[in-house]
Each structure stands twice: as structure tokens, then as C-alpha cells.
Image (tube, rainbow, N blue to C red):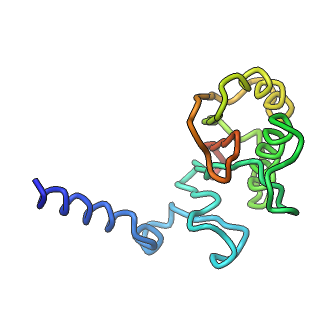
């Protein structure tokens, strides 16, 4: 059993090691970042696989202060969605191309407020969405959102 676990961990490590897919001769995978690697956390802002964009989760950090947006849940949710919009725009994409969002809340009671803020950033037909409660998020954020978008060739 121990050997199987070690083998599994080694295989996962090999698959997830930096550059495994980036060095592939298949040009359909792109790792998109607006900041150099030394200035960001160890993940890509967006990974493009053919016509699909996978956006890393965003929280309500104000880029100017590097702190969570002040003013309560709605302010933090608004900053989170603004960060998603700015990340997409930095790479030439838009919110209209988002087809799915996954929302994590530390308090499910914020669901109604989320919908109010969300409707300011997305218009009908809305992207598909899953929302669920979690016990904690990075930096004590109250919301994290990750998205998938589809773009033309």
C-alpha cells in the first residue's frame, strides 16, 4: 500500500510539475499572466486550452492596497468581479465570454447580496454558476470566484 501511495504521489508530481505541459509541442495550451513570475503567486491567471479559458480563483483584493476591499461583503464581491473583468481585459477578453462561474462563500447568508452584485457584472443570458459555502478562504476573504470562458480561435 505504501509503495502504491508513493507511486501515485510521484506520478501526480510529474504531471503537475512546472513546464510539463508548457514545453509540449502542442501549441494549444497557453499560460497567460500579466505579471512576471517573481511578482505573483505560483499559479497562472488564465490557462487557455484551445478555445477555453480557465481563470484562477479571484478574491476581493484591491490591487492598489493589496488588501481586501473595505466596506463589507458587497464591496468585496464587487472587487472580486472587477478583478476577474480586469484579468480578462488584460489578455484581450471580456466578461461576455464567461460561460461558467464557481463561487465560494464563507457565509451562505451572503447569497442574496452576491446575486445583486453579480448582476452588475453579467447580463442575460447569464453564465452557468455553482455557489457553495466553505469554512475559510485565502487571506480571510469572504468570497472567491473562478470562471471558465470560451473564446474564438
In the image, 131: left or right of 71?
left
Q: Is residue 118 depicted above or below 86 in this figure?
A: above
Question: Nearest the camera: 6 or 91?
Answer: 6
Number of numbered discs: 0
Give the residue at x 45% y 73%: 19
Of residue 6 and residue 57, the one placed in the foreground of this image is 6
Whether residue 6 is situated above or below residue 146 in the rendered picture:
below
9, 86: nearer the viewer: 9
Q: Is residue 29 above or below residue 124?
A: below
- Splitting the image into 4 quarters, where does residue 107 fall? top right
Q: Residue 133's x, y, as percent?
A: 59, 30
Residue 67 in the image: state x and y as whole percent: 80, 57
User: Eyeballing the image, is 136 above or below 27?
Assistant: above
The residue located at (80%, 35%) in the rendering is 73
Residue 91: % across, % down: 74, 60
Percent from the top left, x then y, of residue 117? 83, 31
Residue at image coords 19%, 56%: 5
- Please indicate whether residue 135 sits to the left or right of residue 62 in the image: left
Report the residue at 74% width, 53% height from top. 88
Amino acid at each position: 500500500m505504501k509503495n502504491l501511495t508513493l507511486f501515485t504521489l510521484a506520478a501526480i508530481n510529474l504531471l503537475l510539475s512546472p513546464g510539463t505541459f508548457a514545453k509540449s509541442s502542442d501549441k494549444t495550451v497557453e499560460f497567460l499572466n500579466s505579471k512576471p513570475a517573481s511578482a505573483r503567486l505560483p499559479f497562472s491567471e488564465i490557462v487557455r486550452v484551445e478555445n477555453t479559458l480557465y481563470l484562477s480563483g479571484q478574491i476581493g483584493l484591491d490591487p492598489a492596497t493589496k488588501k481586501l476591499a473595505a466596506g463589507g461583503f458587497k464591496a468585496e464581491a464587487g472587487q472580486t468581479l472587477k478583478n476577474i473583468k480586469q484579468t480578462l481585459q488584460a489578455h484581450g477578453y471580456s466578461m461576455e465570454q464567461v460561460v461558467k462561474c464557481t463561487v465560494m462563500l464563507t457565509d451562505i447568508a451572503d447569497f442574496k447580496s452576491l446575486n445583486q452584485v453579480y448582476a452588475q457584472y453579467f447580463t442575460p443570458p447569464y453564465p452557468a454558476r455553482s455557489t457553495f459555502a466553505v469554512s475559510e478562504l485565502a487571506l480571510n476573504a469572504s468570497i472567491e470566484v473562478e470562471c471558465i470562458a470560451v473564446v474564438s480561435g
